[in-house]
Image: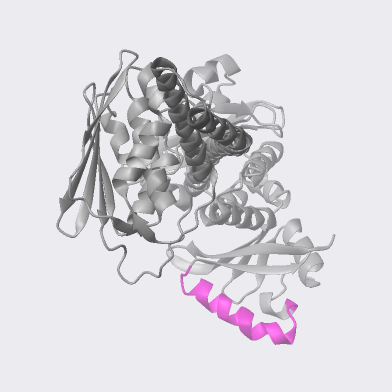
Amino acid sequence: MAGNLFPQTVLDANTLLEARPEGMALVDTEARFVYVNPAYVRLLKEVFNLTVGPGSRHQYVLPNSQRAWASDLYQRALSGKKFTVDFSRTCPEGGVCTFERSFSPVYHNERVAGFSEVIRDVTVERRREADLRRAYDLLEKQITARTNSYQEYNAILAQEIIERQQAEEDLLESGERLSQILQASSIPTFVIDENHTITHWNKACAVMTGLSASEMVGTQYQWKAFYLYQRPILADLVLNGASEEHIAKFYNGKYRPSSLVKGAYEVEDFFDFGHVSKWLFFTAAPIKNLAGDIIGAIETLQDVTDRKHMEDEVRRMNDVLEARVAERTTQLTRTYEQLLHAEKFSAVGKLAASIAHEFGNPIIGIRNFLQGLRKYVKLEKGDAEMLDVAIAECVRVKDLISTLQDFNRPTTGKVASVDLHRIIEELLLLGKKKLSDRHIQVERNFSPNLPNIQAVPDQIKQVLLNVIGNAEEAMPETGGTITITTELVGENVRILIQDTGKGIRVKDMGSIFEPFFSTKPAVEGTGLGLSVSYGIIKRHGGDITAMSTRGKGTLFTIILPIDGVPGEEDSLTIFK
C-alpha cells in the first residue's frame, strides 16, 4: 500500500500524525503501545491524569479500578469489532467536555495485529446536537446558531496534512501507518496524487458512496462517486490551483474559501448516490511538499442530511407560526373595530333613549291640551278634523318614544305571553318613515288565528327588528317589497320574512349566523345581529334559517314553540 503513496515526494506520516489534534495510538495484541502521538499523551495527562510512554502496556497506565473495564474494550477490538465510546470529563478551563474514543482492529496479512485508538474532543458537536434537538422540540424558536464544528475540524485536518510531510527514509513504515489511520477514521476521506489518481479511499468513504477502495484506488474515477458524467470534483480543482471564477462554474453559490487553509475550499451540496440521497459538507485542500509544490489533494466529507432536514423543519414551523400570528392579529384587529363600533351604537342608543324620555312629557302635555281644546272650544268642521289629526299624531309620537325606550331597556329575561302581530306592528310603526322614504312596501299575510306564544318579549322583538332591518337594508335605491307571513304549524308558529333585495352571496351563506361576520363596512355593522338572533331563537327552543337567491332576495324563516321551552323556568337569560 505504501507504494501507492505519492512517488518521488511522499509525506512524512510520522510527522503528520504527531501534529494531529486527535489523540491517536496503535496497540499490539499484548496491549503494548506501538505508537502514540503527542496529542494522545497530552489528552491522557490532562483529561485522565495518566502518563504513557513508548512500550507501555495500555491497561497498566490506568488505575486498578479501570483495568478490568479497559481489558473488555481491548478484547472487543482484538476480536475484530470496530466501535466508539463517549465519555465526559471536567474541562481544564471548567465545565464538562465530551470525548469520543474510537477503537478499530488493525490487520496484517489478513490477521488482527492489534488495534488503533483515536481520542477526539466532540464537546462542540454534542452541544450543537443538543441545541438542534431543543430547537426542534420547541419549534417556535429560530435556530440561533449554525454548527461549524465539522467545518473547523475538516479545515484543520486539511491544514495539518498540508503542513506535515514525510521523509523518504521512513516511506514504507510511515505510509503504512498513514493508511491505517485513514482507514480507521470514521470521517469519509480520500486522497489523490499530482496525476489525479486516487491513492486512498477509506472505509467510511466506501460506506457513504457505495464504491469500495478496490474499485477506486489507482483510478481517476473519483467523479463516479458523486456525478453521472465525468467532470472535475472539488479535490481536482484544488489540485489544479483553480481560480474562484473557475470553481464557481461547478459550485456556483455553494462554495466558499476556507478561512483556515490557503488554497482550500468548502462546499455544501446535495448528492444522490443511487442507494441513498444525502446533504454533504466537504472540504478539499492541497497537499504540498517541503518546497511548497502541490503534490496532491485531500477531500473529507461530512453527512449533514439530518441537520439540513431539522433546519428546514424548524424554518417551516416558524413560517407556520408567523402566519398564524399574523392571522390572529388581523382577526383581533377586526374584532376590536367591530366591538368599538358596537360600543358607539350602544352609546347612541342610550342617548336616543334619554332624548326620547325628555320629549315624552311635553308630547303628553300637548296631547292633553289639544284634547281639552276639543272639549271646551267649539270649532268648525274643518278645524275640528285638523285638531283630531294633531291629537292622533301626538299619540303616534308617544308610541314611537315608548317603543324606542323599550329597545334600549336591558332584557328582563322573563317569559310572558307574547302577541307576535302586535310586536311586528310596533316595529313597522317605528320604521314607517324610513320605509316610506325608501319606497319600500310592506305586505302583511297574518294568520287570523295565530295564538300568543310563551317567550321573552323584548328578546323576540330584538330578533324581528334585526331580520326586518336587514331586509330593509338589502333593498336597492328604487325600493322593493317586504312580505311578512305568520302561520300556525302544529305546536309551533312560523314567521316568514321575504324581501326583494340583492340577496346573499353563496360563499357567505354558511357564515351569516357567526359572531362578527358582516358584509357591511365596519362603520355600518358589527356582525352581531344575526348571531345574537340565532342564540335567542335556539334558547327559546325554536329555529331560524335563511334561503337566498342572488339578485332576487332573501327569505328568513323563524319557528317558535307556542308553549315555550319545555322544562324552562319562567325566566330565560340570553345575551342581548
Where 270 sits versus 566, above or below?
above
Residue 345, placed above or below residue 13? above
Query: Of all residues shown, which one is farthest toward the right?
Result: 93
Q: Which residue is more in the foreground, 353 or 203?
A: 353
**Residue 69 shown in magenta:** yes
Residue depicted at x 29% and y 36%? 509
Q: Position of residue 199 (x, y in %)?
A: 49, 40
Residue 54 seen in the figure: no
Which sits in the foreground, 369 or 69? 369
Closest to the observer, 375 or 33? 375
Question: What colour scheme does the image use?
Answer: one colour
Q: Position of residue 220 (x, y in %)?
A: 41, 31
Residue at screen point 59% across, 18% down: 244
- Tell how many labels: 0
- Determine if residue 127 is in view: yes
349 or 395: nearer the eye?
A: 395
On the image, the x and y values in percent for residue 189 come to: 52, 44
Does the magenta portion include 171? no
User: Which span is picked out in magenta?
Assistant: 61-81
Looking at the magenta stretch, what is its main secondary structure?
helix
* In the image, residue 413 above or below residue 446: below
Q: Point out residue 77 in the picture as x, y percentages from the top left corner.
A: 52, 71
Residue closest to the far left: 490
Residue positioned 44% across, 17% down in the render: 383
Q: Is residue 377 left or right of residue 98?
A: left
